[in-house]
Structure formats: C-alpha cells, structure tokens
Amino acid sequence: VSTEIEDRVALSLRDRADRDVDTDTLLTGAVRRGRRRLVRQRVSWLGVIAVLVAGTVTFGVLRPYPVIGRHTAASPWNDLTPRSLDDTLMPPAAPAGSRTALQDPAAVGGDPGLLHLSVGPLPGHYVSASWATGSGEENVVLADADEAARVRAGSSPVDQDVMISLTTGPDDGTHGATIVGAGPTVLDGTFTLGGATVSDYLVPGGKEADTRLLRWQPAPGLLVQVTTAADDRKARLIAAAVRLDTVHRCVVPFRLTQPPTGTATACQLTFSLTPVPLATTIEGASGSGTSYTLIHGADRMFVETKQYTGTGNPCGVTDGTLRPPSFSTVQLDSGTGRAYAHWESVPDASHLEACQPIGGMVVSVTTVGASYTTADAVRVVNGLRPAGQLDRPDTWPASPLL
Amino acid sequence: VADGDPADDDPADEETLLGFEEYVRTRGPALVRFARLVAGDDQLGEDLVQEVLARAYPRWHRIVRSDRPEVYLRRAVVNARASWWRRLSSREQPHATANRDVPAGGDPSGPAGERDAMWREVSRLTVRQRAVVVLRYYEDLDDATIAEILGCSTVTVRTHAMRALAALRGRLAPETSGVCREH
C-alpha cells in the first residue's frame, strides 16, 4: 500500500521525466561514439599485449598490485554460530589507553582517526566491512558474500547485510532516520542486553524480506542501532556482538604533502576479502578503499582512494571524444607520462578524477562549495604520497595531514 | 561497468548492429527519462545515456545474450552518475542545487507547484537515494531488481528508500514530521 508521500513522489517523477526524447540524435551519437571506442580498444589492446610480452620477458611474470584481504571459503549462511570477523576486515587497534565510547561517549564520531565501535564474534559470513566515523556518528556496514557465492554454497538467497550505528545524544526518537518514515514499523519486543533494554523493531518488507531494527542505549549519551534482514534470533546475536570497549584507528594509506585549507572531520575505511577488479567495481560491490573528509566553513573536500586491482582503465571517462560537456582535462605533475585527470563540474559537486595509479591506488577528490577550487583539488592530488604498505593497514597513518 | 574489456568482440555484424539500433529506438527514450531523473539534470542525463550506450556498443551482442540489457544499462547509468568513489562519502553527499530548468512561476501551492517542490527535494537527495527513489516510484521495480541494478543488497535498497522518504517528508512538512536527522 503506497503512502501519500510515495504517491506524490511518483507524480512528481512522471511529471519531470515525461518529456520528449530525440531518439535520432541519441542513436547517431551512441553509434558514432561506440565505433570510435571500438577502434580505440583494438589499438590499446594491442599495446597491452605488447606490454605483457615485454613484462614476461623481462620479469618472468607480472605481479598484481597488493590486495587487502584474501579469499576465504564460504560458510553456511544460516549458521548461528558466532565467528570473529576475518582479521583483514578489522581496522588496526588504537594505542593502549585510548578512551572507549563507554568511558567517553562524547568522543564518538569526534576524531576522524578513531573508531569506537567494534564487533566481537557474530553469526554470518562477511566479506567486506566498511568503518566510518565523523559528525558525531560512527558506523560499520558488514556485507555478506555475493549472490553467486551463496548459490555455490547452496544456501538461502536472503541477504544478510548488517549495519551497526553508534551515535551520541539522548534517545529522543530521532536517532536513525531508517525508522522515521518507514511506515508500518512495529515494536516486536524488547530484551535486555548488558543491562540495557533493547527495542526490537520489525519493518515489514512486503514482497521482500523484512528488515529488523534493534536499538538500545548502552550508556547515558550513547545510542546503538543494528539494521539487518536477518531473523530475530540472528539479529539479537548480532546485537550482542556489538563492542564498545575497544578503540581502533581509522587510517588512510596516504599523506597529503600539499593539504588543503580546512579541518579533517570524517574518515571511512573499507576492507574487502574479495578483490574486485576496479573496472567492474560498482556501488555496493566489495572493494577496498578509504575516504578522508576535510571541511572548510560550509564547504567540503573528499580525498578518496581505491585499490587498483585490475588491468583495465580505472577511470570511467578517459578520452576527450567521449567526455560529456561537464568534463575538462587537468594536467597533473608526473614524470610517468600517464598523468591525467578529469575535472567534472556538476551542479551538486565538482570532482577531480585522477586516473593515474599512485602506489597501487587510484585517487579522486570531490569538492563541494566555492571555497575549494580546481587548483586546490589538483594540488592535493599532486601532493598525495603513499604512506605505509598498502596491504598492511597497521602501517598507515591515522591522519594524512602532516 | 567494465571499460576497455579486452574480451570485447566486434559487434559490427549486421544483425547485432540492427539489434542495437532497434533497442535504442524502442527503449532509448525510457533510458533517457530514467537518466534525467537520476542525474537531476536533463542535459547531463542525456549525456550519460549516450556515453553508456557508446560503451555498450562494442559488446552489445554479449549484453543482449545476458537477457538483461535493461538492468545492465540502468546500472551503467547510475555508475556513470555516481562513480565508485562517491560511495565512500555517501553519508556526506552534497545536496544538489535547485535544478536549473525547473519551471519558474505559477502557483507554488497548486498541483504543478507541489510537484516542482517535490522534484526539487528529490534532486537534493544523494545520488544513491535518488536512484532508488526513481527505480521504485518511476520505474516501479521491486527491491530485488533495484538491488541488482545498484549492485547492493535489498537491505541497502530499503535503507536508502526509507531515508529518502524520511528526508522528503521532513523537508516538505517539517512542522508536522518532527525532527529527522539524515545520516
């Protein structure tokens, strides 16, 4: 049953989208561009073959870039046996003596270099973990194995991704927008966890699996929320696995020798057991990367890295003939001869895509607001230097700012 | 979407080429409309579709063989709009500025004005939230198909949808919906 707001959204979208489309222009342009692309691929592929041949002759075998994590065998999905997350999905530990969330709730989400949320052994088989801190909130998203792996394992196709959030402040009902506006969310029960009362909500999924949302206040000023499609029993085991008595570091594999103006506010760290070739990486797919956010007044700059594990071109747009009008080419400082970047200026953000792999990473900078310019973004990319060993996050700095 | 895949074959046999053209003629307009909404900008949406179709062209025979060109191309449009790195900062996705070609004038409290106001708020959603909203309420797809297009889980789809609706509800009627913080 659709709600009034859903009806209004649908009406607005139809009103907005249903305008004429010039199919002839679309087809002509697509075929012309497609043919160019085809020709270019043939040429570039010949070049790749030449490089491979040369590499084999010179070095015997070409080594791929190092990859965070490793493949592990799938385990049964519906097994409720708690297991520790794979070590490679965990961020490095903070120095001994760091104050935990329980000791200092106000510290949650306050330092982009520290993570106060963790998990102990929990049911499920997770292949990636994304840890984030900033703006008074921390969260971790644990993604289970992909559909193909599930099929191979012969287990249920019901996804079991888990999102755990930790925020500060009183439980005034506003925590977790996931429950606000969800419609027929129902309180399905309560139980006690470490002395706190956990509210167990059910968000009916209609044709899809239901979502379960567990929320509790483990200490004054702290709120925890678990969202998962797992059943009630498993969800409660996941809640019981939430740890607030440890501190980890949110680290990045780079330093900025030419940092922009601004203050660091947020960090996100994604580890994956399954390396995904960058050229096929999509939203939600597992892939390792980092994000560091700087803020200057109301404006923001995101400096992000992604591991480069493929042999294809990591950039979506690489050729002037294919660039939409909003793109322009930016020259980077590099002696490699492969330095190029694209500056995309779009209404909601401007984006510098540095396609040159730097130490096994590709780098991007997104700016929001007028106080960060193209020159700032280029300077940041030019000044970015790998720090630590890419496959050893414990060697990465907690801040890229020197 | 793979780019520069060396395994791409020549699509230029007559049958494949005709199939591509037929697809663009029959399904291209729907793809453009979808892209306009996801991009939040008509021109950008059309650019994205042309780019996506150009990339699909060299491998069209394989895409067709997958029997899911609709899913493939919509995924490609979303990817083109919100490239992989933006996932990492999705919690802090900037809000879009008001769309430049939103019609001005008219009665803002009338039906057209209300639809414009709603669209402006939709365009302020993060790219991922907007994509889910468009796929759900314009394309009328189920969560499983949306998840397939976006390459994420259905939980993520529902989370995006719930957050998007909560945000829209809060922005359009802040005096009645209470405080709702968007993460």
Image (spheres, coloured by chain):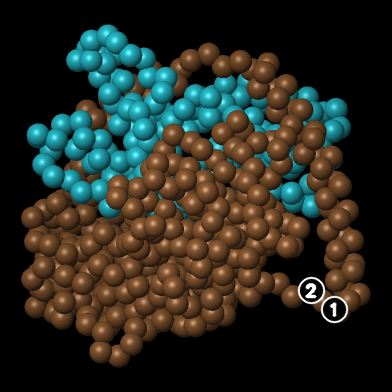
Chain colours: A brown, B cyan
What SS does tag 1 mark? helix
Quarter where residue B97 is shown: top left
What's the distance in space between the residues labelled 2 and 1, CA to CA? 7 Å
Q: Which residue sits at x=60%, y=73%?
A: A67
In depth, the one of A27 and B104 nearer the eye is: B104
Amino acid type shown at disc 1: Phe
Q: Chain of mark 1?
A: A
In depth, the one of A273 and A122 nearer the eye is: A273
Vertical relation: A14 (above or below) A334: above
Q: Are marks 2 and 1 on the same chain?
A: yes
Vertical relation: B145 (above or below) A79: above
Q: Mark 2 touching mark 1, by CB under 8 A?
A: yes
Amino acid type shown at disc 2: Leu
- Disc 2 crowd rating (10 Å Cα; few below 14, some 14-19, many 20+) is few
Q: Which residue sits at x=21%, y=54%?
A: A176
- Disc 1 crowd rating (10 Å Cα; few below 14, some 14-19, many 20+) is few
Percent position of residue A60, x then y: 86, 79
**Which mark, residue A59?**
1
What SS does tag 2 mark? loop
Do we see residue A151 in this rendering? no
Percent position of residue A128, x then y: 47, 68
Vertical relation: B179 (above or below) A214: above
Quarter where residue B107 is shown: top left
The residue where tag 2 is placed is A62
> Looking at the image, how many numbered discs can be counted on the residues?
2
